[in-house]
Amino acid sequence: MASTESQPRFGQSVKGLLSDKVGSCSGDVIALTRQVLKGSRSQELLGQAARNMVIQEDAILHSEDSLRKMSIITTHLQYQQEAIQKNVEHSKNLQDQLRHLLK
Amino acid sequence: MAATGEEAAAMDSISRVPTAHPTVLSLGGKPEPRGEIGEISSDSQIVPTPKKPTNSIGDGGVETAEEAVEPAEPDINELCTDMFDKMAIFLQGELTGTCEDYCLLENMNKLTSLKYMEMKDISINISRNLQDLNHKYASLQPYLDQINQIEEQVSSLEQAAYKLDTYSKKLEAKFKKLEKR
């Protein structure tokens, strides 16, 4: 029957057989490494994770923008509250004057 | 016994001389010099030649032979080392691709966490400011009540002014009527 690759072929030297064997072993190691990487599916999962994160980045930036606007609005409210506080202190005098007028 | 010894020596001499035909037997004469390693050319330089198969007759009279082999290249060790080094570099490169993906994801996660920390700080500031504002507006409540009272008093003052104005107009009309009589 046909001989396998491991058995010596008729007419080939030991050197040729050895080089063939070394080449086939190298190819097997490379194929094994690639199969291990392919079987772990790490490339697909990591790529999907990166894509999802890129999609989320837009939402994150929008949220940050909204928060900054809220902080600015809060600052404006503080300014308005200080102005109201300053003007409300005159209302006591006004009330006294009105009470005298209405007596 | 001596004849077989001579025959064995003759067989050895025949097998070891490179130029001699293996089938030619020389039973007589002096044994020719052996030339296993190489031939001595006319320039007195040793030329490497492949080893020829050697036939030897063992003690049991069985003829054995060795396989013809080529001499090893002088830099075979370097070639093997080079081959394995390059194989290691290739495998390292295959694995480094996945490692780089992980590094990319790690960096993206770190940047996102920094972003979220900034947002957290902003949110904490907003929360604190709004709590202060609520307290201040709560402290302003009595003043706002006063403003409401002032508004009511002003409206009642306005009603009183309208009444006074109406009464004064009636009084003016009566006075003019009395003046005409």
Image: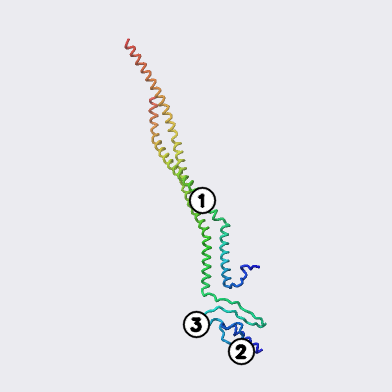
Which amino acid, by three-letter code, is at mark 3?
Gln
Q: Chain of mark 3?
A: B
Say which label, 3 or 2, has the lower sequence index.
2
Q: Chain of mark 2?
A: B
Using the image as rendered, state which of residue B165 and residue B70 is in the foreground. Answer: B70
Q: Is residue B170 above or below residue B36?
A: above
Which amino acid, by three-letter code, is at mark 1?
Arg
Residue density around tag 1, few if under 14, some if 14–19, many if 20 or more, within 10 Å? few
The x and y percentages for residue A15 are 57, 72
Q: Secondary structure at mark 2?
A: loop
Which amino acid, by three-letter code, is at mark 2?
Gly
- Same chain under badges 3 and 2? The reply is yes
The x and y percentages for residue B138 are 46, 36
Using the image as rendered, state which of residue B17 and residue B171 is in the foreground. Answer: B17
Do the residues bearing badges 1 and 3 touch, measured as CB atoms within 8 Å? no
Which of discs 3 and 2 lies nearer the camera? The answer is 2
Disc 1 target residue: A51
Marks 1 and 2, Cα distance to the nearest angstrom?
Answer: 90 Å
Disc 2 target residue: B28
The x and y percentages for residue A88 are 40, 34
- Same chain under badges 1 and 3? The reply is no
User: Can see residue A98?
Assistant: yes
Disc 3 target residue: B45
- Same chain under badges 1 and 2? The reply is no
Q: Is residue B135 left or right of residue A14?
A: left
Q: Chain of mark 1?
A: A
Q: Is residue A26 above or below residue B104?
A: below
Q: Is residue B173 left or right of residue B95?
A: left
The image shows a total of numbered marks equal to 3
